[in-house]
Amino acid sequence: MLTEPRSGRLAAWGNALLAGLVPPDDAVQRIVGDDALHRVDGLPGESGPVGLSLALGRLRGLGAAGFRVALPVPGHPLGLSGPPEFNTRALASEEAVLVPGAALGLVPEVSEAGPEGDVHVEVVWHCLPVREAPPADVPSLGEAERELAEALRDATELLSRLDLAGAGPAAQAALEAYRARAERDREVLAPGYPPRAARVLELAQRVGALVAIARGPGAAGGGGGGGFAGAEHGAAVSASQMAVREEALRPVERTARRAQVAAYNACVEERERG
């Protein structure tokens, strides 16, 4: 969880666009980020994939009242509302965007092309019907913030207990790289979000970074980049120790994901409360 999910970028800047706080070109640029191209397939009234700018305008015309994030994993359908076909696709991607008001959802399919060192990424968002129902297990911002404070303590204690400080240089480098990216991309949410949402998202990303580091080599790259390789663990880790570690980390990671969803969905929640 060291990088922002694509669903988060689409929801945040899509919400800012719907609120009239950013022009369409700026929203599209922010959503695409470092990717080469984003398209939307399956949009009602279109026979094939269309550009993101056209798709956002069409969704507005179809009654979009906002954009919500879902970050599900097997056993935890976080942010989903059905039906099964959409949930299955979202679980496979571990992220999705729901569009209340239009009763539609978007699931990204990511592909890479090009030689090593010059790889470009293209994303196709598959548009499918969704149920207009409360999303699963999404906390309020206040609840998420309280849970995160405890999760941060748990994650810090786990790093110490697992002797990852002894494996230190690689783990520390990964955390410093995360902090550098966070500092560079200081605007973690789009205009229109309450300050508390930005605070919760930053803390959730920090907790997610600690979880990724605690899981070991490569895990810190979750979401498409920023991992670290060759981290030592001080001592050999048996399969049983790894299982114990994963069991301890799972609820902390779950809390971080729930908080991310709460942050990205905050302005929609506020709008629905009037």
Image: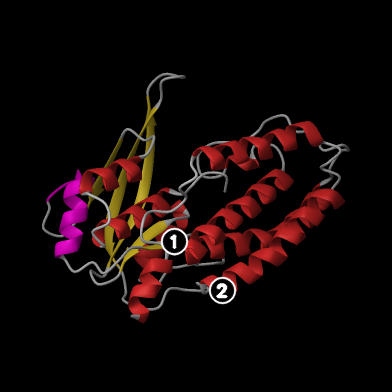
Q: Specify the amino acid type for callout 1.
A: Tyr
Gap between marks 2 and 1 measured at Cα: 14 Å
Sequence-first tag of 2 and 1: 2
Is residue 77 visible in this depiction of the protein? yes
Q: Residues within 10 Å of mark 1 (few under 14, many from 20)?
A: many
Q: Nearer the viewer, residue 82 or 142?
A: 142
User: Percent from the top left, x then y, of residue 22?
Assistant: 26, 52
Q: In terms of image quadrants, where is residue 164?
A: top right
Q: Residue at x 36, y 35 (%)?
A: 35
x 67%, y 36%: residue:
176
Q: Position of residue 74 (x, y in %)?
A: 54, 61
Which residue does the numbered mark 1 point to in the structure image? 264
Q: Which residues are magenta?
A: 47-61
In the rendered view, does 224 fall on the left or right side of 133? right
- Residue at 36% in and 46% down: 109
2 or 1: mark nearer the eye? 2
Secondary structure mainly formed by the magenta segment: helix
Q: Secondary structure at mark 1?
A: helix
Q: Is residue 55 magenta?
A: yes
| Residue type at the position of mark 2 | Gly
Viewed as shown, does residue 216 lie left or right of 139? Answer: right
Circle 2 crowding by C-alpha within 10 Å: few under 14, some 14–19, many from 20: some
Relative to 229, residue 178 above or below: below
Q: Which residue is mark 2?
A: 142
Left or right: residue 121 versus residue 182 is: left
